[in-house]
Image: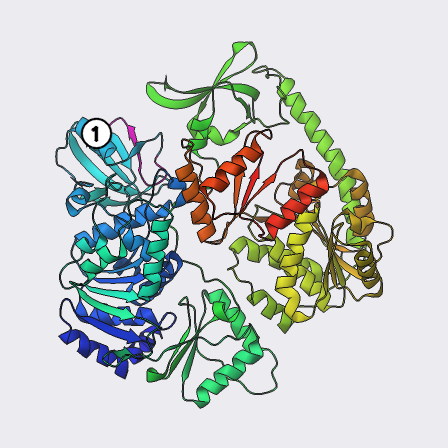
Amino acid sequence: MITEIKRKVFRSYPMEALRQRMKSLKKGETLHVRGVSGSFMAFVIARLFEEQKVQVLLVVADDDRAEELRDDCAVLLGGENVFLFAHGQTHDAKLLDMSAPIARVETLKALSVQEPVVVVASGSGLASKAPTRAQFAERLLAVEANKEYPFENFLKQLATLGFEKKEFVEEYGDVAVRGGIVDVFPFVGENPLRIEFWGDTVESIREFDVLSQRSIRQLQMATVAGGLSDNPASPLFEYLHDEAVVIFDEPVMIQKEIEELQSEGIENIFDWKYLQKYADGLRCIIHSSLSPSVAQGIDFGSTTQAALSGSVKLLREHISVLRTKRYEPVLMCDTEEEAARLKDLFESPSPEEFQAPPLLSLAFHSGFTFPAANIAVITEHEFFGRKKRRGSSRRPKFRGFSQKEISQLKRGDFVVHVDYGIGKFQGLQKIKVRGTEQEVMKVLYLENDVLYVNLNFINRVQKYSSKEGHVPALTKLGGPDWERLKSRARRKIKDIARDLVKLYARRKHEKGTAFSTDTAWQKEMEASFIYEDTPDQARATLDVKKDMEHTAPMDRLVCGDVGFGKTEIAVRAAFKAVMDGKQVAVLVPTTILAQQHFNTFVDRLGRYSVRVECLSRFKTKKEQRGIIEGLNDGRVDIVIGTHRLLSQDVHFKDLGLLVVDEEHRFGVTSKEKLKAIRASVDTLTLTATPIPRTLQFSLMGARDLSLINTPPRNRLPIITEIARFDFKLIREAILKEIHRGGQLYFIHDRIQNIEEMQALLEEHVPEARFHIAHGQMKGHELEKTMMSFLEKKFDVMICTK
């Protein structure tokens, strides 16, 4: 289908005009175009690339637009032909953008080969200095099997190229040496390389998987690409050959972006006028929506996707109107699951006959209408107000207990072996067992007894954890104490489990509310979620719905890290309850969290006439009375509140669902009241850090458990870098975060001079708004400050730990 759309667009009159004009366009000449909306730019790029067979450089204003168009072009041309050139690392602030240097190396390598490629660059990427061609060539190290490379010199070359020696290769720029084996993770490529030497001769080169350590394929030769050089001096234009085509998308915005970078004091940035001189010697296309006409250029006439506010009814009507105008509507979905969900919405009862348009599980970032080919592309994520996922991250992902974690253990740390008990970690060392050298973990027990644990069985050892400051007693190796301790723990668990089984068996016999199956509104609301469900999140949602549709009261624990989608599961469960005429109570430990949840629920459910209220001490007495009366007579559908919800004056007309967020933060008295409510009401508990008892109950099956282990797509790991205190670096970090619309915490170590630090920061970064928060502030004052930060009334929170 995408091939057919591409064929129709390419055969249109504006595309044919573009082909003819490019035949006569000479170096130093410029073609002006307009009417290139949304992702239609990707079709223009694809036409140029396939027709001209040259390098194509597309320059857009900001990084987000660059990433989106990189993805769109990859849909039409394949990912192997499309590259991104983002702004590189500046100062010592690796924390500002870890992926940009890798993408830059990939792009420069692709351009150096002189083959036709498409490069999408932001204004900041174009303006940032790159290494010269000669410098970059020196950063490439070619290796071929069965050839000699002096081993020590080879390792020195890797160090020169910016590779850091590690115990184990885990990410780009790592190198590990074990005997004659060199594992190296080049800055270009999906997987690391394992190069085996015999003396100074390379015996084999293999690409291997970083997680399983298994070989993927054998290579005869490979190029190890190092990091970028420290003294960049060349513009990206110097990597383009003479026949290259440069497209400037909204040059006024590009110029503004570059000038802002210069005003912020960012180093290694070229001036806009300097860059224009290079562009003047190439074939250029300028797209600008500001031009009233393009008398000598081309008007493609495409327009953006119509705003339909997530209404399936409006979407049906819009598609019908398009068909009367002889347009061919195509609906693009991010995944097959989203396509199936939208198909269900189309098939739900409607007053008139409706033929659904073709649904493709392949999506652009922005829809468009192209009159010249009578094609209208509608993206489901724009229709629902969602965010389309970006291209896959090249950063390797890790799960479970890694060897890196072992290497981070310090001598003297307490560890627990499941068979031998508590000991002290004494480091890793190599010992000979029956003539074979093995790497083992050394663990010291009581009376200086020693246990050596082969790394193949390291899964039986874990770091000891307890309350801060507690020093455990070491176990006697081979003695009965450890087994007795485990036996006592088992008996205690059995006693607790027996009582709980009785409790939960009684709950199973209680008759609760059996909620109806999903309505069309339920499906529409869930489809409007602006992010893509992770597999675990989708599974947990299904588990919750099945529990709610059963007659026995639900008692499910949903456990997942912050930002993994637990609140969305609660929103869907709450909406399901409201659809059956039931009320919902969401209990949270703090007023700040209550306000955050309130904002989320209103944002997700506001369009469906669901009345959501927040009951906390931020409300006046009069407002609280009004909310309580609404709960009593059924006018309030969902209430979100703190301990105030458990007060004796709060009564519900027909409570059907109780959602408890972070139950471990409630006291004993609150939990006793919760038990009374839970007797016949469906209960959903959300937590990122379950207390051991709650988690153990769930693991034993006494409570139903759903785990959300998979992080959302494009969620990057937290990166920590240590750098010298430098106001220039701090200014850069703050301005970059503000520039993208974010906020920051600035952690200061002393309350005594925290105001002085605020004054210094205001002096160096006058563009930002600062506020102070620390533990010696009064409770209501601290909460008020946090609320102001939540409402984005200031940019940087200066606070203590």
Residue beneath the point at 40% across and 32% down? 723
Q: Residues within 10 Å of mark 1 (few under 14, many from 20)?
A: few
* Drawn side of residue 13 relative to residue 496, left or right: left
Q: Position of residue 575 (x, y in %)?
A: 68, 64
Q: Position of residue 152 (x, y in %)?
A: 19, 26
Q: Residue furthest right?
A: 649
Q: Nearer the viewer, residue 728 or 41?
A: 728
Give yes or no for residue 335 being in the magenta stretch. Answer: no
Q: Residue furthest top?
A: 447
Quadrant containing the N terminus is: bottom left
Q: Quadrant of residue 171?
A: top left
Which colour assignment does the render follow?
Answer: rainbow
Quadrant containing the C terminus is: top right
Q: Nearer the viewer, residue 212 or 288?
A: 288
The residue carrying mark 1 is 156
Looking at the image, is 670 positioned above or below residue 175? below
Q: Position of residue 183 (x, y in %)?
A: 29, 35
Looking at the image, is 24 positioned above or below residue 327? above
Q: Position of residue 431 (x, y in %)?
A: 37, 18
Q: Quadrant of residue 599?
A: bottom right
Residue beneath the point at 45% across and 87% down? 323
Q: Quadrant of residue 232?
A: top left
Q: Read off the magenta span.
A: 169-180
The answer to whether residue 543 is visible is no
* Drawn side of residue 612 relative to residue 200, left or right: right
The answer to whether residue 188 is visible is yes
Q: Secondary structure at mark 1?
A: helix
Give yes or no for residue 176 being in the magenta stretch. Answer: yes
Looking at the image, is 384 positioned above or below residue 640? below
Kindly identify the amino acid type of the residue bearing the numbered disc 1.
Answer: Lys
